[in-house]
Amino acid sequence: MSRRDIVKVQAGLESVAEQVLQLAKERGATAAEVALSEESGLSVNVRLGEVETIEFNKDKGIGVTVYFGQRKGSASTADFSRAALDDAVRAACSIATFTADDPYTGLADADRMATEIPDLDLNYPWDVTPEMAIELATACEDAARSYDEQISNSEGASLSSHEGTRVYANSHGFIGGYSTTRHSMSCSVIAEDKNGMQRDYWYSVARDRNDLESALEIGNKSAARTLQRLGGRRLETGKVPVLFAADVAGSLISHMISAIRGGNLYRKSSFLLDKLGEQIFPDFVHIHEKPHMKKVLGSAPYDSEGVATYARDLVRDGVLQGYVLDSYAARKLKMESTANSGGVHNVLIEAGELDQQGLLREMGSGLLVTELLGMGVNTVTGDYSRGAAGFWVENGVIAYPVDEITIAGNLSDMFMQLQAVGNDIDYRGNIKCGSLLIDAMTIAGT
């Protein structure tokens, strides 16, 4: 889509938003908000050199929420005709008549609305045809399958390209919108030897297709990672140091974010309840949110309530500095919104001086975790127990692959026992994190 087309789409969505707000006002709503989107994309999957699926999507939708004092109703539609918009507003107003008063509900505070919407460089359309997508996905899978004769099968390769424009408006007078793109390529293969079969994968994702790793790189990495896992063994049960590889380490930070989310806090269902201003990590740990990083997947100029996003510390010198709050949770907790309605935006944990190899040497002997299985994490207590696979390390060198084990601990203890953060940061997700070395965890094996 050209720049002119993008401007036209956004202008059209803003016009619809204004219509909806006016309809809500005419029906007596004391406040209203509306979110609209128009998206399109292409996804292709190939397996063993054959095309399995080609999917096109072109979607649009609108969600409207109305408030009558402290009563709230919501409705949605994919039809932008005047009659359908009127029906959606009428439905939302009708629902509001059946809801109870909630003193904490309502629009975000007017003085928190974004007054400027910076260009964060998030839109890089790719005019990729199905033929081009099939060719790239096939080349990716071919690279993996031809990497080594022990690669015996494939779960396939995929390529996807998506573009969308979103607009949010409310009766404070706020209206804003921006366009984004997301392109990705992935591959997963299976290797086999006398001990059995193993699988692994690799993927690349970016706003700009020119920032994607090549089909050859992705295919080769997926094959190499799979081959490394052949001959996996179980470990004896015990307590050992654990190094979480960068591409799984971010999950530990995500558990922290979940524990400081407003909903879990006001329900008193978090192991980090009332920990604001207290030490939860060693004093070298710095975790911060940077919503305005250019050309990055997690960036956003405002949250889903129109509140201006801003850079801030979540943890500084190991001390918890702030929560993750939307307006509703903030009011329940007698605090202010942190512009996190809809989630966090680019959470980074400050890197140390060592890469993964350096951290392996520092660990000496222990477990390198490269895959986590299951969801055995209790946000209320912090208890942590998940299936894992990876490699046993001796004297700082990988000795052999391991699988069919469980790693366990408590997140409070794990956070305080963090020994080092790697500089091998994985930038592909919303949480950008290097490898994390934990002093000791319980391994359940043989």
Image (spheres, grey):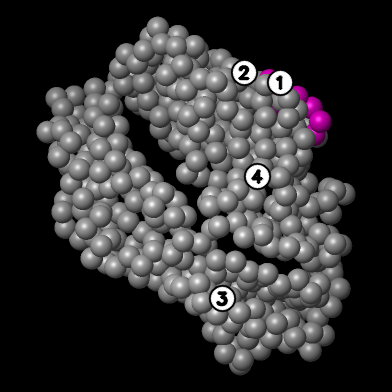
Number of labels in the image equals: 4
Q: Quadrant of the C terminus?
A: top left
Q: Residue at x 66, y 42 (%)?
A: 289
Against 99, residue 371 (above or below) is above
State the mark number for residue 417. Answer: 2
- Observer-side mark, 1 or 4, equals 4
SS type, badge 1 = loop
- Observer-side mark, 3 or 4, equals 3
Mark 2: which amino acid? Answer: Gln
Q: Residue at x 71, y 37 (%)?
A: 314
- Observer-side mark, 2 or 3, equals 3
Closer to the N terminus: mark 1 or mark 3? Answer: 3
> Which residue does the numbered mark 3 point to in the structure image?
7
Q: Residue at x 43, y 65 (%)?
A: 125
Q: Residue at x 45, y 28 (%)?
A: 245
State the mark number for residue 230. Answer: none
Separation of residues labelled 3 and 4 (CA atoms):
26 Å
Mark 4: which amino acid? Answer: Lys
SS type, badge 2 = loop
State the mark number for residue 290. Answer: 4
* Left or right: 116 in relation to 294: right
In the rendered image, residue 414, in percent from the top left (x then y), is placed at 60, 23
Q: Nearer the viewer, residue 130 or 51?
A: 130
- Observer-side mark, 1 or 3, equals 3
In the rendered image, residue 433, in percent from the top left (x then y), is placed at 54, 34
Mark 3: which amino acid? Answer: Val
> Which residue does the numbered mark 1 point to in the structure image?
283
* Left or right: 358 in relation to 76: left
- Extent of the magenta region: 276-282
